[in-house]
Amino acid sequence: MRKIIELAVIVAGIDEEYQNSLLDGITKCAKMNHANISCFCAFGGVLSSSRYDQGEYNIYSLVNYKKFDGVILMTNTISDPVEKEKILTKVRDSGLPVTVLDCSEYPEFYNVSIDNYQAMKDIVEHVIKVHGAKLINYISGPLANPEASDRYRAFLEVMSENSLVIDMDRVFFGEFRPSDGKKAVEKFIRSGMSRPEAIICANDAMALAAIEELNNFGYVVPDDIIVTGFDNTYNARHHLPALTTVSRPLDEAGFRACEILIDVISGKEHDKTTTLESSPVFTGSCGCSSSGTDDMAEYMVSIYKALNSCKRDISIINRMTTELAENETSASNMRTIAQFINDIQFDRFAVCLCTNWDKVIKGNSHNSVPEKIQVNSYTEKMTAPIVIEGGISSPVKLFSTADMHPRPLTGGGNVSYFLPLHFRERCLGYYIFTNSSFPTKSLLCHTLILNISNSVENIRKLLHLNSMIDELDRLYVIDPLCNIYNRNGFIRTADVMFRHCQEKGSKLLIAFIDMDGLKMINDNYGHKEGDFALQRLAGVIKDCSGSGRICARFGGDEFIILGSDASEDDASAIETAFYAQMENINSIIKKPYSIDASIGTIVTEVEGDKTLFNLITQADEIMYAKKKRKKTSRYLRRD
């Protein structure tokens, strides 16, 4: 049986049409060859937050290259140069065969590229020579991106060849995002410079946003200003006016990138570079008439499907968000996620969490050490509280992160999307969609995973808030030196025991204990020794209390033991055990002083108008009488 080929794809921004089209081609080729695709996706650079981007890009640290036979890199979609270099270093170290898309910077890899340079030259020359534009602005992608660099170089060369001045105030450098088109137009219009005759854009997303913003300023395209794009996306083709742009065979490029990699893995040879042709499309936004339009009925059907799908996804997210807000435990949160995620089509869906997602390592008592959180990479083991397959959820308690999947997939032709689960830079885990169109085709995938991630973080915070409340409550009722109840804790628990005896008619045991000679120890050996003596005495009292009874430091050097359902014999038994334990602890610690104390015990019914305070006073008086009879009268606290 032929081994199933495993391929890793590294990409950012899978909600964009460029990435979508390439992935469609990659997926088609992989399924034809029964290969498995693991696509590691981030949405970095979307929210203008470096802390958020750090959490997104961490998904790339999950890739275990030992599990793969080859890698397809779409690093041209990753805007952060540091993250890009990290990926390249790991890929090179893996020794795996690699194909890249639209990038000639790495001669050791197989490069499938589309001619960006000539097509952009054709567009700019058309705007100048056919439409007579001379005052031209340019909206560029990031020059660290090879495609953006080629397109910008083509623009500069055509401008120079036509003896047109290039004013850098008329150039805007963006990240290929729609928001860049809007920002660029705002900058151009508010600059006070003469209105441009044309705006050349390095991709369709920026061009369409630029047209919308020009309309907001009252300008009409192409009557007032020509606008062109690049990529010939679906939205560009169906915009009004249709966008003058460049048609690129993106599906074919993705297919070829995957095909070349599979061939190389299978032992076949290939040229390092494969170049596909692109062609300009001259249409309405530059003033040309369209040479042809897609069938309107088909377009209307596709729009209806897209809107219907979007409404369905919005409904899922809104209902899920409402119910997630009600959850107070991790288990209920995961049940809600599983309930609603089943409305999305997939073969398998998993939520994988770091084993420390709900744990916080706090600083020392002075809070000088900041909280440590999982930021880079993942924990060695992961837990998968949700693994849904065939409508059935079967969680995986623990699995090795190196396996990436909580359970192995069966067969070939599977496509899995790994998406980061994080809050800002805090790494919480990741999601896996297997054989689902939702990550790439839904407009709301990013929104969905943001909502789920925020709900997991909210549960984490709630857990720690409850833990902090418990700790504060513990500090309120526990004596920090002796680690037994303080007076507050005693009163809270003793009241329950007192009422129990009252209602059941059972007897209550009260032992009141006062340490002898604490002042002498403090004066002669220091307060540290005095604290040590108090701690040892508290230990003795705790041991003598046994189960079902409570003990407390009542104040200073006074202690108390309380027990319900007592018998008369219990009084002598507890005092005998107390003195034996005192003798034993002194023989163990071998201090120059003895730890000693006086104890008074009563066993009494709780009846009539007796109060707990009255009964404690009785035990205290018995204890004092015993203390007074002791020969060590210098330790007495009363006259």
Image: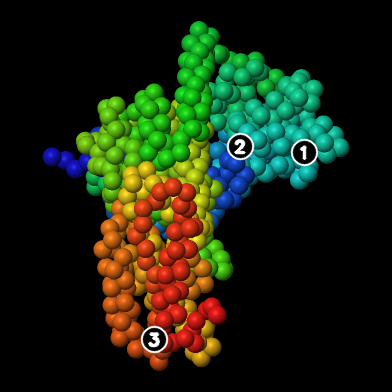
Of helix, strand and loop, which one carries label 2? loop
Circle on res. 571: none
Count of marks placed on residues: 3
In terms of image quadrants, where is residue 219? top right
Instruction: Kindly report which numbered mark, 1 or 3, lies closer to the viewer in this rendering.
Output: 3
Which residue matches tag 1? 187
In terms of image quadrants, where is residue 551? bottom left
User: What's the residue at 36%, 57% (across, down)?
Assistant: 604
Of marks 1 and 3, which one's residue comes earlier in the chain?
Answer: 1
**Can residue 549 be seen here?**
yes
Of helix, strand and loop, which one carries label 1? helix
User: What's the residue at 34%, 84% (across, down)?
Assistant: 586
Residues tagged 2 and 1 counted as in contact (Cβ below 8 A): no
Residues tagged 1 and 3 counted as in contact (Cβ below 8 A): no
Which residue matches tag 3? 594
Q: Nearer the viewer, residue 255 or 303?
A: 303
In the rendered structure, which amino acid carries the disc numbered 2?
Arg
Which residue matches tag 2? 177
